[in-house]
Structures are given as C-alpha cells and as structure tokens.
Image: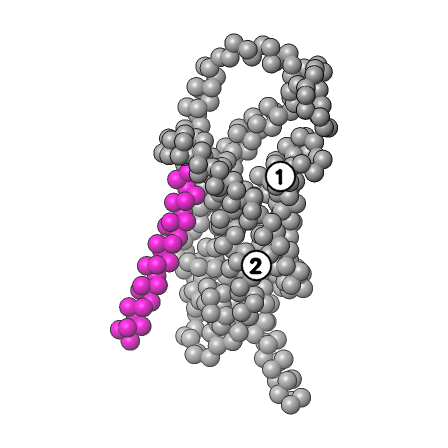
Amino acid sequence: MAAAQASAKRKKVMLWTGVLMLVAIFVLPLSGYLATGVVDAETAAEATNPRADTWRQVRQGNEGYSAVTGRETNELIQGSGENWRQLRNGPMATYGSWLLIAVLLALSAFYLWRGQVKMTHPRTGETIERWSVNERFLHWTTAVLFVILGITGLSLLYGRLVLIPVLGHEGFGIYADIAKLTHNVLGPAFMVCLFIMVVIWFKHNFLNRIDLEWFKAYGGMIGDKHPSAEKLNAGEKMWFWTLATAGVALCLSGLVLDFPNFGQEREVIQLAHVIHLITALILVAFSFGHIYIGTLGTEGALEGMTGGQVDVAWAEQHHDLWLKQVREQARDADRND
C-alpha cells in the first residue's frame, strides 16, 4: 500500500511538473510579448527612414524594371506585403496572445474552484479496452508533432520581441533557422497523421440529442451528476470537428507556405499565412482545454490513452452508452461461439 501511494505521488509530481513546464512555455513568451509590444511600437513610431518617401511612391503601384523573371516581373515592391506585416505583427499577434493567456487563466481558475472530477464509485479492478495500440500510437504521434509545431510556430511569431532580448540577435537567428526548418519539415507529417485521424474516427463523431444533453449538463464538469455519452462525448466530438475544419485549413494553408515556388503569387501566400495563423491560434487554444480535461481535469481519463485500458467504473460514469454497447457486442460474440 505504501509503495502504491509513493508511486501515485511520484506520478502526480511528474504530471504537475509537465503541466507547469507547458504553461511556462506558452505563458512566458506571450506575457513578454504583451509587455514589450507597447515599447516596441513606440520605438518604431519614433524611428524615421530618410528613404521612406521614395519607397512610399514605389508602393503606389508604378511599374519599374527588375531582372527577376516570373509572375511578378517588373513589380518593384509588392504593396500588400506591408499591410500583411502590420496585420500579422499587430492585431493578430496581440489578440492571439490575449486569447491563449485568457484560456490558460480560465482553466487555472476553474481547476482551483472545481478541482479534479473524481470517480463517483470505487474502482472495480475490471478493465475494458478503450483505445487500441495503433490508435494510441497515432494519437501520441500527432500530439507530439502538434506540440513541437505549436512551440516553433509561436516562437517565430513572438520571438523577435521576446527571445531576442534573451538570446541576442545571433542566438535568436540560429534558433529561428532551426525552428523554421523543424516547422516546415514536421508540418506535412502532422498533416498526414491528422488526415488519418479524421478518416478513422469520423464515424464516431456525429452529433445527436445525447450530445445536446451532455452540453446542457456541462459535461459533468459542474455538479455531481455525469451525463450519458457514447464512445466519444460531445466535448471530444467538438475537438474532432475543430481539427477536421480549422486543422485541415491549417494544413492546406501550410502547404502553400511550405512550397512557395509552385506558381502562387505573394497575395495568395499572404492570405494563406493569415489563415494559417488564425487556425493555429484557435487549435492551440482548444488544445489547452483538451489537455486539461484529459489530464488534471478528470480522474482516470489519461489511463485510456496511455495504457489503452480504463476501469469499468470510470467507463460507467463517463461513457455509459459505449460501455453498454461493448458489453452487448461481447454477449453476441459469446452466443455465436
């Protein structure tokens, strides 16, 4: 008993350590951006460029001569590039940082108020398979890729303001090159994993009246009564459809950015970048909730995706309709034998 308690305590310490590290990875850069963004904007406003008038005239769209051949031949400067830069570094970066910080603070406040959703009945010792080995491998591969892409992508978005003061220009330049290469190489791998997930779990994610009741009961996160659910509850289905929509848009726009020399013009690339950034921020924000519910938020939830098995008492509380279906299928199989 003492050894089991010590082991449980070590696992809890390791889990909290991982959560705190994850929070620090996202919160510190975003907080640094918000703290330094105002100073950077004031400095930029005071700076002057003696050749600004010349380039301002070029931006009017007057055609000139350039030695480079291609779709944008003789276009001296592409005016929408500055508009895109201001949009990216201004409202998108600012509101995106507020979004991510707000979600993290809301989840932290909810945990302090609600605590972990405990199992209402003691463990039975009888387990049932929730996720197969292949499903778990696919999930964790996709999850690891998502975290790496999220860290590298956000560090490229906020790095100039947050990381240059820490790493210096040369250090950040080296890191940015590595982050950019990592992001570009792993992006297509994430896309493949995501598309496979969408295909194999599509049949489990149709919304119905059961899911409406689940939402009305706040998924059992508030109160002691837990609503009925199928193999995937309504919250998991919403995460799936977020991946199937925003995630697919993220991947397709990422391909446009990953392979810029396939004939697309700069306006297309800039639009793809806007879509890529917006969908990425949405997915990261949603992922915080998904990670919270699957780890700290719900007792026993992580066991299904680590070991594949869940206790029958947990299944009865959180996915009773799925448990009933599995038992009926087992009884039918026994009769046929």
Question: Residue at image x 35%, y 59%?
Answer: 14
Q: How is the image coloured?
A: one colour
| Circle nearer the N terminus (2, 1) | 2
* Residue farthest front in this picture: 67
Spatial CA span between label 2 and label 1: 30 Å
**Residue indicated by mark 1:** 257
* Residue farthest left in this picture: 2
Whether 9 is among the magenta residues is yes
Q: Callout 2: 10 Å neighbours few (<14), some, many (20+)? A: some
Residue in the foreground of this view, choosing between 128 and 213: 128
| Vertical position of residue 180 compared to residue 131: above or below | above
| Vertical position of residue 252 compared to residue 229: above or below | above
Residue in the foreground of this view, choosing between 169 and 242: 169
Query: Which secondary structure dominates the residues rendered in magenta?
Result: helix
Residue depth check, mark 2 versus mark 1: number of the one nearer the observer: 1
**Residue type of the residue flagged with mark 2:** Glu
